[in-house]
Image (cartoon, rainbow, N blue to C red):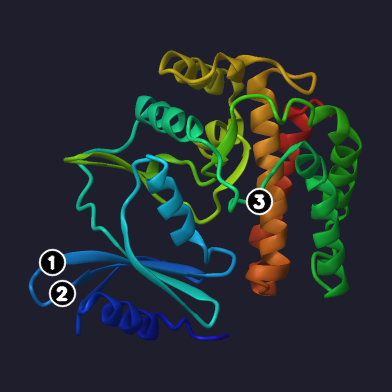
Amino acid sequence: MTMNPSAALLDDLLTATGQTTAVREEVRVWSMSGVERVTFPDGTTAIFKYAKKPFDSEDQALRLARTLGVPVPQVHTSAVLDGWLGMLMEDLGPSVREADDLDGVAAAVALHGTRTAPPLPVLDQERLRTLPARALEHLERLRKADRWQDADDVEDALDRIAQAAEVRSAGAMMAPFGWVHSEFHPTSLHIGKRGWRLLDFARAFTGPGLLDLASWHGTIAPPDPARLRVFLEQYVAAGGTPDVLVPRGGLTAENWALGWHRMWAVEWFMEQSIRWINDPATDPAYIKAVRRHLTDVLHILEI
């Protein structure tokens, strides 16, 4: 496994900002990315974030969001080395409290009201419709590598969803369609002394804003359409488009959102399993998550 080049990246970033040295302190680190607080000799601090493909264009998304008026942390400087992105960003300091649902709708309304920008990948109806087929392709590659051998139930579920996807994906382009944060959780919203900032734009894209709203409450608990409906109504009350409540794909807006968000997550988990992480030791955990999500998708999309 290649070592992450964070030390070399940090050196490049320090040189670019005219600093010579900094003390590193881990905030959160995992196999594909890390967040650290760095302290310079004069006592000032910055956030050092590094990440490998496919998370290596977050600096572009953050700069773009900032240019378009979305409250995000400022990127001081960024560099790429051996397929890893490194960024030095503004240190927002400690949060004063955790984000609640009203903070979430305010942030979503601000983001979804931003005009879309060409560099972001696009998830339109056609792309949404093909998610189950793409997941089946990942499964085929996993099996060719002698992995996921006892996952016939996963294949069956994906086949059923693929057959229903034409009908169920209808309405994907209805408003709100535009910036999607895609990691939209309370932990991605920093509430500090000087207001809020939206973090973690590594996988932002252009697509149905309902996917953000469906992700806010997380995917650990079973999908809760009634809870999401309240959230959608709060979104409208906060100035979001009333179209967010309009049924699509033969389903209520909340069921459509919860079902497709989980299908989007399944395709991502499977791609990660074969392509980005590619470690057979992680297979049991991934298979378990995929099974759970697919059960939810079949139920909530009424397939």
Amino acid type of disc 3?
Ala
The earlier-in-sequence mark between 1 and 3 is 1
Residue beneath the point at 75% across and 19% down: 251
Say which of 299 and 5 sits in front.
5
State the separation of the CA atoms marked 1 and 2: 6 Å
Against 218, is 3 above or below? below
Horizontal and vertical percent for residue 281? 65, 73
Q: Residue at x 89, y 46 (%)?
A: 156
Q: Position of residue 19 (x, y in %)?
A: 20, 79
Query: Where is residue 71, by image quadrant?
Result: top left
User: At 63% from the left edge and 70% from the top edge, which residue is drawn?
Assistant: 277
Residue on which the image places disc 3: 289
Q: Could you say which is closer to the camera, residue 91 or residue 118? A: 118
Q: Amino acid at mark 1?
A: Thr
**On residue 40, which mark appears?**
2
Picture residue at 47% right of the left edge, 52% below the top: 201
The residues tagged by marks 3 and 2 sit, at their Cα atoms, a distance apart of 41 Å
Compared across the picture, whether 111 is left or right of 1 comes to left
Q: Nearer the viewer, residue 1 or 296?
A: 1
Label number found at residue 44: 1
Q: Is residue 287 left or right of residue 184?
A: right
The secondary structure type at the circle numbered 1 is loop
Are the two marked residues, 1 and 2, in contact with CB atoms closer than 8 angstroms? Answer: yes
Give the amino acid type for the residue marked by disc 2 in the picture. Phe
Q: Quadrant of residue 166?
A: top right
* Crowd around label 1: few <14 · some 14–19 · many ≥20 (10 Å): few
**Res 221 seen here:** no
Give residue 192's position: percent from left, percent from top.
Answer: 21, 42
- N-terminal of the pair, mark 3 or mark 2, is 2
Residue 83 visible in the picture: yes
Task: Please say if 267 is above or below 77.
Answer: above
Mark 2 element type: loop
